[in-house]
Image: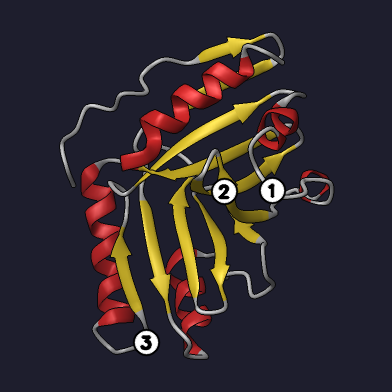
Amino acid sequence: MLNFETTLQVSKSYGDLTLSEVEPILKINLRSNKREFSTKIGKLLSIIPPIEANTSSSNEDYSILWLSPDEWLIYSNNKISYEQQNLLEENLFKNISNINQGSVTNVTDHWVMINLKGSKIYDLLSKSSPYDFKNFKMKKGSVAQTLLNHTDVILHNTDDNNLNLFVRRSFSEDLWLWINDSARFL
């Protein structure tokens, strides 16, 4: 894991809308097209990867986002120590990659997670995204991959008027500035 200082250290509020970066949490990309894969993940994490497009599975510790028929993103729901992260990654690698069941890639340093809360989040996102959020905002646990201000993002609807936005670290500061600028006019 990189030892980095994030540029998005401040939470911001604009009326009913709150924006904040979630502290660096574990994020792991999983890929597999093997049948036994879901069972292995279920035994290791006590959670089954979703098989329906644009959905997620969650338990107290982790959330798993469906990204494609053979790809998922796992993220921890709470901050965990580096030792715990390394232990989990090694355990997944040993039980998945080492026996050719799929691939396990730690992408913690690749993605920044921004939490958006408030009744105006979909007004904000609709300003610069081609995605139609009508059905997305009605379904807790839904996942979308779209563009926001010309930047690829992954959105995870965690609750009513509460979502996590994942953006590549190299685009995070630019997107953060755009979100803050746009939120001022809601």
Is 97 placed above or below 110 here?
A: below
| Residue 2 position within the rendered picture, expressed as x and y whole percent measured from the top left | 17, 42
Reading the image, the residue beneath label 2 is 147
Q: Are marks 2 and 1 in contact (CB under 8 Å)?
A: yes
154 horizontally vs 80: left or right: right
Image quadrant of residue 52?
bottom right
| Residue 77 position within the rendered picture, expressed as x and y whole percent measured from the top left | 49, 43
Is 61 placed above or below 121 here?
A: below
Reading the image, the residue beneath label 1 is 130
Image quadrant of residue 171?
top left
Of the residues shown, which amino acid type is indicated by label 3? Gln
Q: Residues within 10 Å of mark 2 (few under 14, many from 20)?
A: some
Is 36 placed above or below 93 here?
A: below
Reading the image, the residue beneath label 3 is 101
Of marks 1 and 3, which one's residue comes earlier in the chain? 3
Of the residues shown, which amino acid type is indicated by label 1? Pro
Circle 1 SS class: loop
Q: Nearer the viewer, mark 1 or mark 3?
A: 1
Of marks 3 and 2, which one's residue comes earlier in the chain? 3
Residue at 49% x, 67% y: name it.
72
From the viewer's side, name the closer residue of 69 and 153.
153
Residue at 52% x, 81% y: name it.
39
| Residue 178 position within the rendered picture, expressed as x and y whole percent measured from the top left | 51, 25
Circle 2 SS class: strand
CA gap between label 2 and label 1 equals: 7 Å
Q: Are marks 1 and 3 in contact (CB under 8 Å)?
A: no
| Residue 36 position within the rendered picture, expressed as x and y whole percent measured from the top left | 48, 89
> Could you tell me if residue 67 is visible in this image?
yes
Of marks 2 and 1, which one's residue comes earlier in the chain? 1
